[in-house]
Image (tube, rainbow, N blue to C red):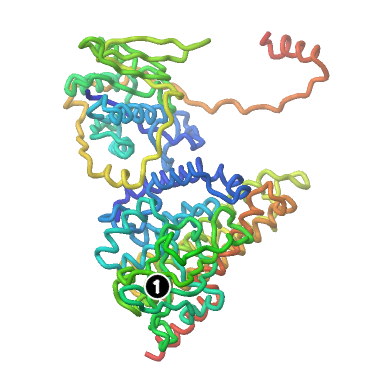
Amino acid sequence: MKILVPVKRVVDYNVKVRVKADGTGVDIANVKMSMNPFDEIAVEEAVRLKEAGIATEVVAVSCGVAACQETIRAAMAIGADRGILVESDAELQPLAVAKLLKALCDKEQPTVVICGKQAIDDDSNQTGQMLAALMGWPQATFASKVLLADAGGQMRATVMREIDGGLETLEIKLPAVITTDLRLNEPRYATLPNIMKAKKKPLDTVKPADLGVDVAPRLATLKVAEPPKRSAGVRVADVAQLVDKLKNEAKVI
Amino acid sequence: MIRDQETLTALLDTLSRFVRERLVPAEPLVAETDEIPAEIVAEMRELGLFGLCIPEEFGGLGLTMEEEVLVAFEIARTSPAFRSLIGTNNGIGSQGLIVDGTPEQKAYYLPKLASGELIASFALTEPGSGSDAASLRTTARRDGDHYILNGTKRFITNAPEAGVYTVMARTNPEDKGAGGVTAFIVEKGTPGLSLGKIDKKMGQKGAHTSDVILEDCRVPAANIIGGKEGVGFKTAMKVLDKGRLHIAAICVGAAERMLDDALSYAMERRQFGKPIAEFQLIQAMLADSKAEIYAARSMILDAARRRDKGEKISTEASCCKLFASEMCGRVADRAVQIHGGAGYVSEYAIERFYRDVRLFRIYEGTTQIQQLVIARNMIRDAQG
């Protein structure tokens, strides 16, 4: 069984991002970049499935600038077997990435695609779902537990999902798309010897045109702004005053 | 050996994250219990930290000196106890074997040291010999195909954790200097080998030292490192500059951490209506510390690169150890001063670091020994 894991290069979660002065986006010059944390969980899950003898190959894919190969190497250091970089300097929106991934799925024929439920930069939460739709595959999003098993010649996934008010368990046929939530697993630290071995693993580069995909943006960003500064709080005398303020000033009750 | 910027960055990033997420939060516990939790030791093993300087063919990373000091800058940004645990396997505990070991000794011990399955300890210092190491009095008397070792070793790092000891003992009683000293591999559990009580140190809780006592301890002659009498001490001296650069780099990492702590405190702590970081006398302490750390970092990287190129850097290594450890002491002192009363209580890490870093000016050659080495080299070079 082959597992495809898309990984995105994003601003490191420890970095306090700054909005560019002209409001066109976030300043990423000289900012530390890392693998999207949800994608790290996806890589970890795929590698665990391989270590458990269920999967036979884990392929990490990243779409974006040449530096995304660092992100692919990071996935290989955790345990992915090989990598594919879809190199493009264009702004890649979720639909474009989903189309690129579809083209790769057609070529690679994975049994499962495991991806992060969303990326911490744009928080779109769309790529996995779009890919499932384009492939015509079942999807199980926000997974907190994944079990893969052969049920009478048909591979199936039992996926536990965190939903409002509890846990939902789905059973889906494979091939399918699974997106990971925070509590699915705790990714390991890549060991130092494995980081060194990762540079010897195969990494192919393709262009969107090679895959016949038009990645032109469909959405235009009008403006990016800092969230408003938090203003100082006030101390209230009693519950009555609190209720009054919530009702009449904040208008939240 | 990496020599590839991308992989090196990935390695340093991983290490820095491990230090920040796993080691820093465990600092108070380690200080309180005087022990590194077993699961953290297991993670350090898993990560490959015990084999940083052991050649790749034996399962290590085979880091160059430059790479090693970059790693040391990162790993020193937390309690020195963590570094101390991996220090002997990467330094004096394994280097003798790497430089002079027989093929059999290397094949048997190095993979175990690289994986951290075995912890190595280096037993040179004695109650009567420290800086004057060559005057050591532990004896090794030949008896058939064995040697009988007698003597006491003092302040031996990781002795309680070690599975194997490199013991320096005098095989030639006629030669009172370095030439009479031989290095023996002594395994834990060898009859006649025992340990003293764990030393109660000023700081670095969680890192252990103790006496190693040898009473008619029978060691096979095959356990002489390199198989020849009289080379042990010379081997130890060959790797001195490496250890000195390593400790100098550790001083930089620790100083950077202390300065970070002091800066955050100064930006938060308000007096006279504003953060104390806005006062010029506090700023002077911050700036002096920053400049000195940068100087130490630069000189260490320079010396490390030159060592990698094969240059002799005995003088430079001593300069680095001297300057970086003294600098670290000054930064610790200023960081406590910036913290004010808070710096004197154990709620803030700086109180612990202040005690922890005091050792840097003492071990791996005291400041005074470094001064002597530097000046003697200067005079010798001038004499041609």
Residue at the bottom extreme of this rendering: B383
Q: Residues within 10 Å of mark 1 (few under 14, many from 20)?
A: many
Is residue B101 or residue B273 the one in the foreground? B101
Above or below, A181 relative to B97: above
Is residue A32 or residue B46 the one in the foreground? B46
Above or below, B260 relative to A140: below
Amino acid at dot 1: Ala
- Residue A2 percent location from the top left of the image: 22, 24
At horizontal 41% and vertical 82% (from top left) the residue drawn is B178
Could you say which quadrant of the image residue A195 lies in?
Answer: top left
Is residue A177 or residue B81 the one in the foreground? B81
Could you say which quadrant of the image residue A38 lies in?
Answer: top left
- Residue B32 percent location from the top left of the image: 63, 48
At horizontal 33% and vertical 37% (from top left) the residue drawn is A78
- Residue A170 percent location from the top left of the image: 37, 9
Residue at which label 1 appears: B236
